[in-house]
Image: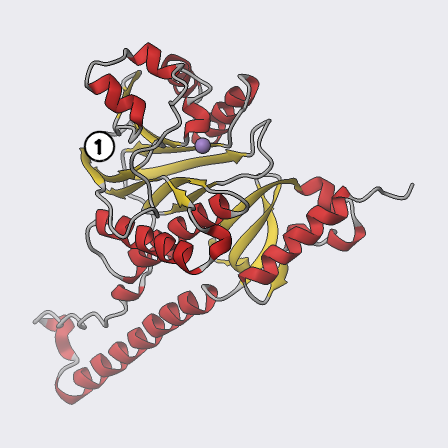
């Protein structure tokens, strides 16, 4: 099936930083909502998303296992670094494999299926109020206004190992999957979400509109929405899905018998050898490129905001050689208005992630300074 994705994240109207993170790296999609003082929430959600993605590229295997690896990474980091002790994050991921979606989920972010005009919730909130609703103690309506509705009962990064909910979904053309954080579902009821999904055929428009509506409704939390549309047809091959485990040399197909198979004997073998060698060079090149890109960082613009990217600010025959790791709330136009960051749209390269984040920090600081007329 063909997949088209729209993604939007926003700081909201109350919070001081965006602790949500998301991943759009076909065929893997995810949202994470970090919690924890200081920078803990940001660190937790980014680390979880990053680890999930890396594990997925390194080896196939159950998605739930990759989520558990993400859990361990956040847990161990929190143990090592006292400044982020107690940090944790939700993680809701979808792996699209033709007409199947595999979902893995921990926390109170959500996945929905929008099909034939109906919206159904695919995930269960791992919250205290959800447990109370399930046991009949309170009604779903009471849960929405409950003073303890933010208490999460299961989350990534708090324990060494966690139970991960997994859902295997058969997809149909026209299906739309929504992954979102509670900054969306806390502000909009499901009927409003359904209405927006029904009215916005373009996935990016739908994601943008959902975030906008949550902001209009108050925006008390960070808001993230990922809209994944499935349509009939084949997806073109994606550069980012050239993971290391595909770096094996495919056998050179044997030639058919008959007049076309005149190249035979030693010459045929030599051609096969050269073909195999050329293929090996291409495969090694792609793997090398991937490894190289994973070590490159720059600061650029995503959805009109200053963002930290992994990769290099370029594309080759339509393949982008980068992806967004953090999208900040800083409007790119503001940063570009400062002479120092005029080149932001072309990407300001950094030695590593820390340097990239330092650049973002500088931008934020420079913007908060009073400007000379
Ligand atoms: Mn949240």
- Place of residue 364 in the rendered image (x, y in percent of width and height, measured from the top left): 69, 46
Query: Which residue in the rendered view is the most extreme toward the bottom?
Result: 266
Quadrant placement of the N terminus = top left
Q: Secondary structure at mark 1?
A: loop
Name the side, left or right, on which 210 lies relative to 350: left
- Place of residue 29 in the rendered image (x, y in percent of width and height, measured from the top left): 35, 43
- Place of residue 54 in the rendered image (x, y in percent of width and height, measured from the top left): 35, 58
**Which residue: 27% across, 18% down?**
116
Name the side, left or right, on which 322 lies relative to 252: right
Query: Can residue 117 be seen by looking at this rendering?
Result: yes
Q: Residues within 10 Å of mark 1 (few under 14, many from 20)?
A: many
Query: Can residue 114 be seen by looking at this rendering?
Result: no
The quarter of the picture showing ligand 1: top left
Q: Quadrant of residue 140?
A: top left
**Which residue: 53% across, 24% down?**
220
From the viewer's side, name the closer residue of 125 and 28: 125
Vertical position of residue 2 compared to residue 200: above or below: below
- Place of residue 289 in the rendered image (x, y in percent of width and height, measured from the top left): 43, 68
Name the side, left or right, on which 22 lies relative to 301: left
Q: Quadrant of residue 276?
A: bottom left
Vertical position of residue 119 compared to residue 125: above or below: above
Vertical position of residue 82 compared to residue 228: above or below: below
From the viewer's side, name the closer residue of 276 and 363: 363
**Which residue: 31% across, 28% down?**
127
Q: Quadrant of residue 353?
A: bottom right
From the viewer's side, name the closer residue of 203 and 169: 169
Q: Which residue is mark 1?
A: 171
**Which residue: 42% across, 14% down?**
192
**Colouring convention used in this rendered image of the protein:** secondary structure
Vertical position of residue 1 compared to residue 82: above or below: above
């Amino acid at each position: 099936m063909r997949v088209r994705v729209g993604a939007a994240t926003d700081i909201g109207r109350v919070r001081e930083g965006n602790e949500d993170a998301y991943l759009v790296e076909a065929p893997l999609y995810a949202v994470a909502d970090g919690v924890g003082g200081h920078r803990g929430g940001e660190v937790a959600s980014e680390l979880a998303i990053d680890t999930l993605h890396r594990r997925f590229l390194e080896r196939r295997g159950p998605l739930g296992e990759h989520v558990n690896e993400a859990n361990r990474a956040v847990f161990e980091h929190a143990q090592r670094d006292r400044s982020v002790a107690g940090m944790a994050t939700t993680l809701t991921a979808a792996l699209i494999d033709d007409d199947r979606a595999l979902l893995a989920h921990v926390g109170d972010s959500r996945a929905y299926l929008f099909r034939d005009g109906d919206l159904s919730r695919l995930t269960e909130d791992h919250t205290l109020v959800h447990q109370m609703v399930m046991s009949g103690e309170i009604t779903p309506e009471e849960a929405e206004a409950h003073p303890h509705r933010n208490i999460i009962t299961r989350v990534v990064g708090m324990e060494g190992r966690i139970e991960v909910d997994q859902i295997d979904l058969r997809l149909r053309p026209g299906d739309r999957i929504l992954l979102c954080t509670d900054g969306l579902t806390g502000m909009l009821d499901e009927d409003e979400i359904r209405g927006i999904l029904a009215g916005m055929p373009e996935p990016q428009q739908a994601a943008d509109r959902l975030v906008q509506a949550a902001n209009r409704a108050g925006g008390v939390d960070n808001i993230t929405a990922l809209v994944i549309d499935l349509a009939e047809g084949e997806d073109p091959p994606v550069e980012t899905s050239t993971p290391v485990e595909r770096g094996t040399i495919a056998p050179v197909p044997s030639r058919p018998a008959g007049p076309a198979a005149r190249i035979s004997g030693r010459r045929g073998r030599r051609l096969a050898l050269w073909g195999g060698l050329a293929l090996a060079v291409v495969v090694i090149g792609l793997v090398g490129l991937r490894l190289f890109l994973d070590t490159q960082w720059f600061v650029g613009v995503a959805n009109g905001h200053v963002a930290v990217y992994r990769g290099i600010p370029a594309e080759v025959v339509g393949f982008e050689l980068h992806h967004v790791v953090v999208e900040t709330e800083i409007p790119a136009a503001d940063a570009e208005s400062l002479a120092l960051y005029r080149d932001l749209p072309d990407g300001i390269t950094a030695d590593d992630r820390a340097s990239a984040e330092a650049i973002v920090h500088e931008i934020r600081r420079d913007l908060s300074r009073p400007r000379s007329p």
